[in-house]
Image (cartoon, helix red, strand yellow):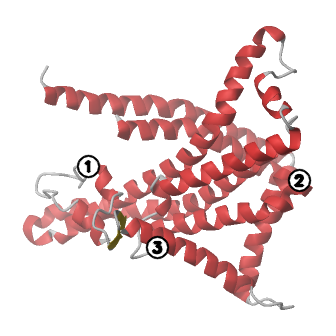
């Protein structure tokens, strides 16, 4: 395999890797937000607390996708 | 904006369908120094960081100066911003002791908010938080604060409770302790910095690729004729992302402040 082909393959692999890294956080953020909406609908007076916790949950879940995004550029 | 167009100007609009620069790093590095002090180059990024600092300080100074009974409209807006950080973040997360940490949290919130909003400010178009320096220094400061507070409030038991958690069954305790040690003292500051950095990099990348592609395709209308219509969807999509990025900029400023407060809170009350 030539060096150029190896470079091209590396870029393609990085793309696939980022795609894989985005699956988990995607599902996770869906679960977090879905349950937060359910909590807000069931208990509107606790909406503020649910919202803060929701953002926290999103931030923690999202970190994995963002690390994947950074690695995509490093690779 | 001209930096952006320069970065992607090598694009051949008669062949390509989107203008991507050779190397994305071009979009984040301003090489030419405005002036140099010794071996330190004062580049556009450095200038923008100082500008962000000056803007954040000016907003707070002009918003809150004087001792007035009825604040001006601008003053009322800034007061609600400060109250939000103080009540919602400092008191809401840390509790009554949060007042002590309000100045730090407010500084982080203001500098990150202004730095992030530079992304969508005309003629600046560069989020200073997308260069790792600013997120990294904020993460290091937060790390120093929560570790210092943890040790000064709880003594050495802060470290022992982290690496030898009493609530975990004895067989798993060493494993949980190891994970906790790495996640508290290593991963927390790293993810805190990377979260802000990567969000801003992603936003800046999308905005520059889409809007610059649109502008370059329209600019080449004399050479490529009807083919320049390719630029229209890029430009429209770019404008959509532009609005989304305003939301992201404010949200990321909120999240980094919120997480700083949460990390301090875990040191103030380690049992939670």
Up-down: is B175 above or below B26? Answer: above
Residue at the image point whose x is 59% and y is 33% from the top: A27
Q: Chain of mark 2?
A: B
Where does label 3 land, which residue?
A: B121
Rounded to the nearest whole Å, what is the CA distance between mark 2 and mark 1?
47 Å
Quarter of the rendering occupied by the N terminus of chain B: bottom left
Q: Which mark is residue B95?
A: 2
Residue at the image point whose x is 65% and y is 61% from the top: B108
Q: Is residue B135 left or right of residue B81?
A: left
Which residue sits furthest top? B171
Which of these two is toward me, B54 or A27?
A: B54
Rounded to the nearest whole Å, what is the CA distance between mark 2 and mark 3?
35 Å
- Element type at marker 1? loop
Q: Tell me the crowding category of disc 3: few under 14, some 14 to 19, or many 20 or more residues within 10 angstroms, Cα based.
A: some
Q: Is residue B101 left or right of residue B186?
A: right
- Return the x and y of residue B262 as percentages of the image width and height: 76, 47
């Amino acid at each position: 395999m030539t060096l150029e082909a190896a470079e091209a393959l590396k870029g393609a692999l990085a793309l696939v890797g980022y795609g894989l890294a985005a699956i988990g956080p995607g599902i996770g953020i869906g679960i977090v937000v879905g349950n937060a909406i359910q909590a807000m609908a069931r208990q509107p007076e606790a909406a503020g607390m649910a919202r803060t916790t929701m953002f926290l949950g999103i931030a923690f879940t999202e970190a994995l996708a963002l690390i994947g995004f950074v690695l995509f550029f490093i690779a | 904006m001209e930096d952006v167009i320069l970065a992607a100007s090598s694009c051949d609009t008669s062949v390509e369908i989107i203008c991507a620069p050779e190397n994305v790093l071009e979009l984040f590095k301003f090489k030419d120094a405005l002036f140099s002090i010794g071996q330190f180059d004062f580049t556009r990024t450095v200038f923008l960081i100082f500008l962000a600092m000056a803007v954040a300080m000016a907003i707070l100074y002009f918003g809150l100066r004087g001792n007035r009974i009825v604040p001006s409209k601008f003053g009322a807006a800034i007061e609600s911003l400060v109250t939000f950080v103080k009540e919602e973040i400092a008191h809401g997360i840390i509790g009554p002791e949060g007042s002590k940490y309000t100045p730090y949290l407010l500084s982080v919130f203001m500098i990150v908010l202004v730095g992030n909003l530079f992304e969508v400010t005309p003629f600046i178009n560069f989020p200073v938080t997308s260069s790792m320096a600013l997120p990294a220094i904020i993460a290091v400061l937060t790390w120093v604060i929560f570790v210092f507070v943890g040790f000064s409030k709880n003594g050495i038991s802060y470290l022992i409770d982290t690496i030898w958690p009493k609530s975990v069954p004895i067989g798993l305790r060493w494993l949980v302790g190891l994970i906790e040690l790495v996640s508290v003292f290593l991963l927390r500051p790293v993810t805190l910095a990377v979260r802000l950095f990567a969000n801003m990099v992603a936003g800046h990348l999308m905005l520059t690729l889409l809007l610059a592609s649109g502008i370059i395709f329209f600019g080449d209308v004399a050479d490529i004729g009807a083919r320049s219509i390719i630029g229209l969807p890029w430009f429209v999509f770019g404008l959509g992302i532009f609005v989304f990025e305003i939301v992201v900029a404010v949200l990321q400023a909120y999240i980094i402040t919120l997480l700083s407060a949460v990390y301090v809170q875990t040191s103030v009350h380690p049992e939670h």
